[in-house]
Amino acid sequence: MTEQPILEVKHLQHIYMKGTPLEHHALSGVSLKINKGECIAVIGHTGSGKSTLIQHVNGLMRPQSGEVVVDGMNLSDPKLDIRLLRRKVGLVFQNPEDQIFEKIIGDDIAYGPFKMGLPIKEVRDRVKWAMEVVGLSFDEMKDRATYALSGGQKRKVALAGVLALRPDILVLDEPTAGLDPRSRNELLEKLKTLNEQEKITIIFVSHNMEEVAYLAGRIYVLADGRNLVEGTPEEVFGEADTLKKHHIGAPDTVEILGQLKAKGFAVRPNAYQLEEAAKEIIAVLRQDGR
Amino acid sequence: MAQPLIQVKNLSFEYVVNQTKIGVLHDISFEVSPGEYVVIIGHNGSGKSTLSKQLNGILTPVSGDVIVNGWNTKERSSIREIRQKVGMVFQHPDNQIVATIVEDDVAFGLENLEIPPSEMQERIDFALTAVGMNEFRNRPPHYLSGGQKQRVAIAGILAMKPDCLVLDEATSMLDTHGRNEILKVVRKLNDEGMAIISVTHHMSEAAQASRVIVIEKGRIIMDGAPHKIFQQAEQLKRLHLDVPVASQIARKIQAHYQDFNGTLIHNDEIIKEVVRLSQREVTFF
């Protein structure tokens, strides 16, 4: 038997302010098929429908037309167990610091598991685990006040709060926007570990192509609420012209290589990793110098 | 000699939380001249946002002074003049958008300045065109995407034609394309003489400025041209910062190919350097 995808989206459409003069088509038939354990990036120009799409995954939005099936649960089903769905799918919003509402860090992270009715010992274990995963020391930080944290720390607390629910699928909207380079790298490493070791399926929206290149195993590119391109980072960044036409950037490495290729240098323009890109350029320089 | 637009003199600032004082900025001094393009970098919690809020009197110093065009930000009577000189765009546009229609939002500041309607229309056109949001002028802002909203917020400030634009991580919620568009607008405004002070986490953005200030624990620890600052990769890493991708590539290439200039920080410079090195050989072809 072939493996059932953990998330399948078929021809999903969504129209904001339907039937008014301001009607706006956010999604006009998007399809995704994501298997368990994958790490997927969804990219696209601002307004391409990325955020609208991922809000469907945990049932914040229900399909107006088309289908969303999460691990066998159809979101169009009127008798859908929404609590079960949200336990499966953890959604971290664009500014997750807005999700924090408790005064004390430990309380905030414990809120979800506590509401699930877990025994207090289990709640405590989960909070501890989640905090360690995002790089917050349980002993040092659990009793600290949430309002006195920096942006990056708040981001980690919010992520821990979602992780403590132990979701099978983690959905993140621009997870590193506004973080400094070190916090960004740390968070990316954590997400990679979660994906590879804890086998959590990750779907993230990002406009930072360096981060997409680092994290994603597969990329879906959206434009005007439709699928544009999909594939591995190498395949997608190989479509530089298509991306450019739809106002989607590429990593700086791909930009540089693309410009060199346009000038007639024999480089592979989709060698997106820093190390590989440098090798491509060195090879060109050595060849010409001979 | 041209008078500095903004003078920051021995500025210190602290937040008081539960009667405990938390020092955020310590004895900071610098000047910004008209037409300069300054980028402020520093890790989360280094005090850079707090510093930017001092520049048009949203926060005022606990000790020391901030002088904008001769006005001290502590004198609340001149706060309108100060804010007209120095406009500010924040990280989250939702905190800055007030009206229910894009056009009205851009007009909001102008109405407060009592600009005549005919000129108001002109300025709104200019500002919305500059940020590429003209076709959205009749949309309600809350149905725009994050990046689009940010462009509206920037337009609202541009319409007031300030001498200095302060951007507090204003591009961090935008995609690459959106960010490049804003940076293009910012560069154009700068070319036309507007001073820019931008707080950012994007090192490639910092590479475009004429000057980079690095903040750590509320103190200025580096201040200079981007080419100079980004040669100190090790120290920047220790400060949770980084160098532009172009700079990382340049170093890697130089390590294996010594003639390559390892101090480059822009993508364009890499291209030029490769062209230069491949053309200087007589044996080419």
Image (spheres, rainbow, N blue to C red):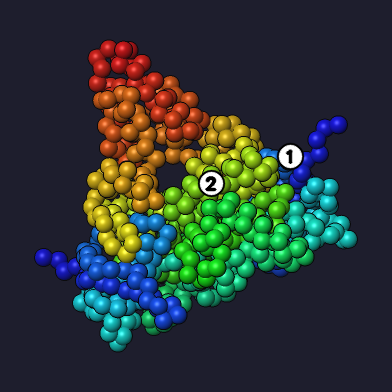
Residue under the image location 27 percent in, 48 percent down: B229
Residue under the image location 80 percent in, 61 percent down: A82
**Neighbourhood count class around disc 2 (C-alpha, 10 Å): few under 14, some 14–19, many 20 upward:** some
Q: Is residue B281 above or below residue A243?
A: above
Q: CA distance from mark 1 to mark 2?
A: 21 Å
Quick one: SS at disc 1? loop
Quick one: SS at disc 2? helix
Amino acid type indicated by mark 1 = Asn
In the rendered image, which residue does mark 1 sit on?
A35
In the rendered structure, the answer to whether residue A70 lies left or right of residue B29 reads: right
Q: Where residue B199 sits in the image (x, y, percent)? A: 37, 60
Nearest to viewer (mark 1 / mark 2): 2
Marker disc for residue A188: 2
Residue B58 figure quarter: bottom left
In the rendered structure, the answer to whether residue A162 lies left or right of residue A253 reads: right
Q: Where residue A166 sits in the image (x, y, percent)? A: 70, 53
Subunit bearing disc 1: A
Q: Is residue A116 above or below residue B209?
A: below
In the rendered structure, the answer to whether residue A30 lies left or right of residue B1 reads: right
Q: Where residue B74 sits in the image (x, y, percent)? A: 28, 82
Q: Residue furthest left?
A: B1
Do the dots labelled 1 and 2 sit on one chain? yes
Subunit bearing disc 2: A
Q: Is residue A273 above or below residue B65?
A: above
Which residue is nearer to you in this view: B154 or A8?
Answer: A8
Specify whether residue B165 is in view.
no
Residue under the image location 25 percent in, 67 percent down: B28
Specify whether residue A172 is in view.
yes
Amino acid type indicated by mark 2 = Leu
